[in-house]
Image (cartoon, helix red, strand yellow):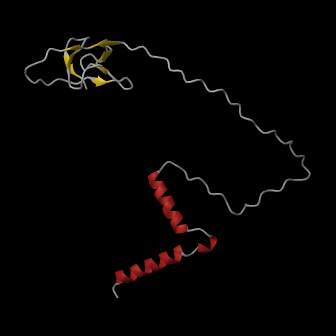
Amino acid sequence: MPLCFKKTILVVTAAGFIAAGDFALGGNPVGDFFKRLGNSIAHPRQTPTPKPSRKNSVPAQPNPNQPSAPPTPPITPVVAPAPSPVQTPTPVTARVADTAAPSKSKRDLPYGIPVPGKPGFVTSPFSSKSGYVDVRGFPSGTEVKDPYSGKTFLTP
């Protein structure tokens, strides 16, 4: 038999004895080892939480010579009344867009940016910090004139 085959058999046999060593204790040390190894690679700075010991599974008996503390009354949670859901309308600074003159040639125009939670309102791509533009009533893809900058953009 070749030497490398003998070494392989020896390593496999030794691993089998090591793996079968502590099965009587109820744990799987090889599996725990690989689990800890994997966790140390995945989470290198975390320390593992210690497992509770089975040796001290019997609760301690109270000492009859020591006076016992009086029982504490149960804590009742105090529940505050829930506030009523009242929606306060937020003021919207918006100007109504005008219809732009239709162009005969096809132009590459930017689209207005829809405002989340406010259907029919967009932010102009040319003056995004000025305010909202009201495009309610205009179909999608219509050329409209920005009331803040005077430039033309498309409705989304």
Say which of 131 and 22 sits in front.
131
Where is residue 24, by image quadrant? bottom right
**Which residue is drawn at the image coordinates 14% and 14% (left, top)?**
101
Q: Going by the image, does 100 lie left or right of 20?
A: left
- Residue 62 locus on image (x, y percent): 85, 53
81, above or below 92, in the image: below
Left or right: where 112 falls relative to 118: left
The image quadrant that residue 93 belongs to is top left
Nearest to the observer: residue 33 or residue 106: 106
- Relative to the observer, which residue lies in front, 153 or 70? 153
Instruction: Give percent across and percent down for residue 50.
Output: 61, 55
In the picture, the quarter occupied by the N terminus is bottom left
Q: Which residue is drawn at 39% across and 25% down?
A: 117
- Furthest toward the bottom, the residue is 1
User: In which quadrant of the rendered image does the C terminus lie?
Assistant: top left
Question: Residue 140 at what x, y percent from top left?
Answer: 24, 26
Task: Pinpoint residue 14: horizontal percent, then vertical percent.
Answer: 48, 77
- Residue at the image position 62 percent from the left and 57 percent from the top: 51
Asked whether 70 or 94 is in front, the reply is: 94
Is 136 left or right of 91, judged from the image as shown? left
Asked if residue 142 lies left or right of residue 60, the reply is left
Q: Is residue 146 above or below residue 64?
A: above
- Among all residues in the image, which is located at the extreme left? 105
| x 7%, y 22%: residue | 105
Task: Give the tally of numbered discs.
Answer: 0
To which quarter of the image does residue 142 belong?
top left
